[in-house]
Image (cartoon, coloured by chain):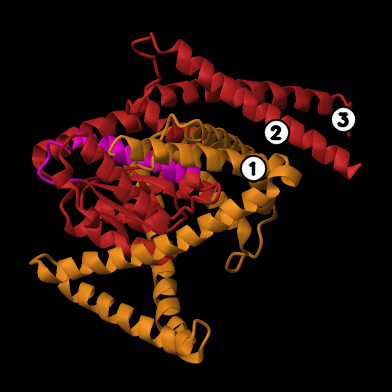
Amino acid sequence: MEQVLSSITNFLSILFILLCLGLILFYLLSDRRREKINLRSIQAFTHFRRDVDLAVEAGKRLHISLGRGNINDLQGGSAFIGLTILDRCARAASNSDRPPVTTSGDGVITILSQDTLRSTYRSLATEERYDPTNARLTGLTPMAYAAGAMPAIHDEQISANIFAGHFGTEIALLTEAGERSRSLTVAGSDSIPAQAVLYATSDEALLGEELYAAGAYLGAGSAHSASLRMQDILRWVLVVAIMIGAIVKLFGILP
Amino acid sequence: MKKILPITNAIIAVISGLFVLLGYFFPGVFGGIQSTLIGWAIILAAIALLLGIFNLAMVHWKKIGSDGPGKINSIALLVSLIITIIVVSISGPTGSWSLWIFNSFQVPVEVSLLAVLAVILVYAGARLLARRPKWNTILFLVTVLVVLLGSVPLFFVGEITPLSIVRGWLAQVPAIAGARGLLLGVALGTVATGLRILIGVDRPYGG
């Protein structure tokens, strides 16, 4: 019986992944000819764009914090979104005197952030701007990571902080540092406790799946828009499934 | 060479990702190659950690040479790093000297930061109304107060039963429903991110 249940779960999981893949590929191909996709307004991204422009004009720096997620785990998803945001920031700030600075709490994410910065500058033919010390590992435990990232916010003329990745409640120390240095904080995380803290402490919080829409909102490519549309469709599928489940349970069909 | 390397990176990433994914669904066929690839990933993560620590030392070495603020902190960090490496190399990761360093420095500093965090959260809660004067902010703060007052017995009053009942309902029904909604959104986002990387249309590894 257990083996049958496991086979059914496996089959449904494969079906779900193939459905997601099919939807992404479908929208990727069908949206190729469309010039622009309409997205609902998210205040955090509007402010983010404005602040990147202001930072470039004022000759100040952007700080992108990628959290302490491990890419061998589920937390890696949000860290990859952070890397996409880093790429967009480095491109937007390519005219600035001060390149963005990145902090993270995991060795792999640090290497990936260095790699992202290097490949972004290479694609812009400004490879000489790359400095490995602009992508830093600040600590390996939650508190050490926060304590290491705080001086970067205080001392390096940061005008805006973008937190995108896996964090815990220690993110309050970082948003507080941003508040004290009068820099804007835009933040999103995959962790529920961190989202609760961000709602109370950040200037602009990205809640739930909003963080994962960053690529589409910041113009990171049609793949991001296609996957956002896939998420929209599956969200409705889940809503309908939950409603049916609730009704079925209400009428006593399910135990 | 500059064009070949990113394509090779992408091919390696896509094939590895595909084998690891298939290993979850067909452990009999792909389980072996999956565990080998995960083993390699763990070794690479350990090397990345060493490189990260080297990067940390480099950043602070550069700071010592510059005129910027926090020179003393950078010197303290580098001295501590060197001493810790020497002590742990001699005493071993679970040796008495290594544990003494951990228990005497790391633990107290982290506990102090936790205490600061508690103060910051209370302060942020109080400041929230000035920052976002909206009805959902009021709802948020009222909920926080009800949950706090319903969680602990109060001076001279003891436990307030109606508040405890409301707290229980808040924690069991709206909080869980909201958290599950957020988690479903996060799960869909994670699947989308993973699939974009798996089909090679998103390459956050410089490919």
Query: Which chain did the renderer colour red?
Result: A
Foreground pick, A251 / B143: A251
Residue A221, position in %: x, y? 36, 25
The reply to whether residue A82 is visible in this rendering is: yes
Other-residue count near label 1 (Cα within 10 Å), few / some / many at <14 / 14–19 / ≥20: few
Residue A174, position in %: x, y? 33, 55
Residue at 40% from the left image edge and 20% from the top image edge: A40
Residue A29, position in %: x, y? 47, 14
The image shows a total of numbered marks equal to 3
Cα distance between the residues tagged 2 and 3: 22 Å
Residue at 42% from the left image edge and 26% from the top image edge: A224
Front position among marks 1 and 3: 3
Q: Amino acid at mark 1?
A: Ile
Give the residue pinned by disc 3.
A254
Q: Secondary structure at mark 1?
A: helix
Q: Chain of mark 3?
A: A
Q: Which mark is residue A13?
A: 2
Please tell me whether residue A89 belongs to the stretch shown in magenta: yes
- Point out the tag, 2 or 3, that comes first from the N-terminus: 2
Which segment is the magenta one?
A77-99
Colour in which chain B is shown? orange
Cα distance between the residues tagged 2 and 1: 24 Å
Foreground pick, A23 / B46: B46
Residue B1 sits in quarter: top left
Give the residue pinned by disc 1.
B176
Front position among marks 2 and 1: 2
Query: Does A32 sit above or below residue B165?
Result: above
